[in-house]
Image (cartoon, grey):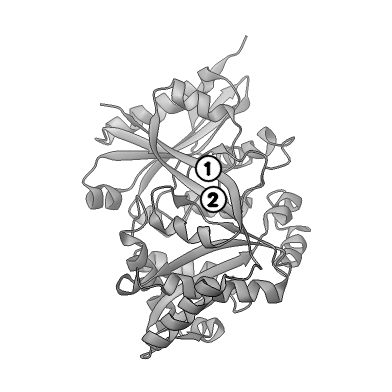
Amino acid sequence: MHDYKIIEVTTRRDLKRFISFPDKLYKDCPQYVPALHSDQVKSLTKVSTLSYCSRKMWMVLDAGKVAGRICAMVNPRYNDRYNTRRARFGWFDTINDIEVARLLISTAEAWAREQGMNEIHGPLYYNTLGKQGMLIEGFENTPPFNCIYNYPYYQTLIEELGFTKECDWIQYDVKANQTLPPKAARVCDLVMERYNLHFGSIEKLKKDPAMVREFFRVYNESFAKAVYNFVPFTDEEIEEEAAQTMPFINDKASCVLFDENDEIVAFGISFPSISEALKKARGHLFPFGWYHLLKAMKDYTTTDLMLNGAAPKWQNTGVSAVYYKKMTEKAAELNNIHAITNPQLETNSAVNVWRSYEHKPFMRRRCYIKTID
């Protein structure tokens, strides 16, 4: 007989248990990639997005042991942008028990109503940067470090609680070092010549704060209409994200395309996969987690395609094919075999670019939504 009760996460001890629960839940799952606990503490307590978002966290306990967790959030910038009154849920993990899932979801829904919301959707992060989308296909694969992994039963539980599909994101495993068909290569060359484009140095860009800000401005603009549920970065978020990601970006596997006035046209950002290293780190940088991560950053056998986009005025001009061609050339030099794409909305025409490449389905993840008024 279970004795489930739900508690709000309010103390540092509670937060530690909240963060470590998935490590216990998935300890026998070979595909699960543990997040660094230090990163989770920051995301849940100190990230700049909390300057405008509100959130609460809860855990379900069973005789003192954690059986589930959830975080409910309200992003007013999202609601203003899309004229909605939606809360979102994330950090959703549970044992395979509908009563635990019901306690978690109903508590999040009750809080959302108190905030004046009439819908709740997820799993999502505060904004577009974090992990989102419940895995519904591809359970046999190990996800990139920035993507959710969950057991198959999550889908059954969430649908039994009245949630329906809002959207799906799909990911592919692309053969990274393949050669483009001659016709596609010729098109890339023609686009480069027609618009007088050239590739610049990411290392040089990283040393220029103004160019870094410009990079994220282009990111904001390029994704504003193309990415579903996108919330543009604030200046504070740009500074924070730049400090976290720029040190790991280099010219080996990434590229940035400029026009004749040295303005950013498009970009392709790729990292070596660190998923296996994070498994070995088990959520901690010390004592040996840093070693596994450092080693992984030098291995380009599998890469994660993190950010790919073009400035609005350059979209639908063929420049996406240009930077993808450049990245396949880099992949060949690095002996990069697999490139795992970032989640892309299934209805986004940008997914059609992969038809020019040898690829196979990798994962499908879903955002669920429910009316709660």
Residue 174 in sight from this viewpoint: yes
Q: State whether residue 348 is above or below residue 198.
A: above
Q: Which image quarter is the N terminus in?
A: top right
Disc 1 target residue: 364
Residue that sits furthest to the front in the current view: 183
Quadrant of res 349: bottom left
Q: Secondary structure at mark 1?
A: strand
Q: Is residue 189 left or right of residue 152?
A: left
Q: Is residue 107 left or right of residue 117?
A: right
Percent coordinates x, y for residue 150 in the rendering: 59, 37
Tell me the residue at 42%/87% (across/down): 193
Tell me the residue at 53%/87% (across/down): 204
Q: Nearer the viewer, residue 139 or 127?
A: 139
Neighbours of disc 2 within 10 Å: few (<14), some (14-19), many (20+)? many
Q: Which image quarter is the C terminus in?
A: top left
Percent coordinates x, y for residue 241 in the rendering: 47, 66
Percent coordinates x, y for residue 334 in the rendering: 71, 73
Amino acid type, label 2 = Gln
Amino acid type, label 1 = Arg
Q: Nearer the viewer, residue 227 or 108?
A: 227
Tell me the residue at 52%/24% (across/down): 156
Do the numbered discs 2 and 1 sit on residues whose CB atoms are within 8 Å? yes
Q: State whether residue 113 is above or below residue 133.
A: above
Disc 2 target residue: 171
Q: How many marks?
A: 2
Earlier-in-chain disc, 2 versus 1: 2
Residue 246 in sight from this viewpoint: no
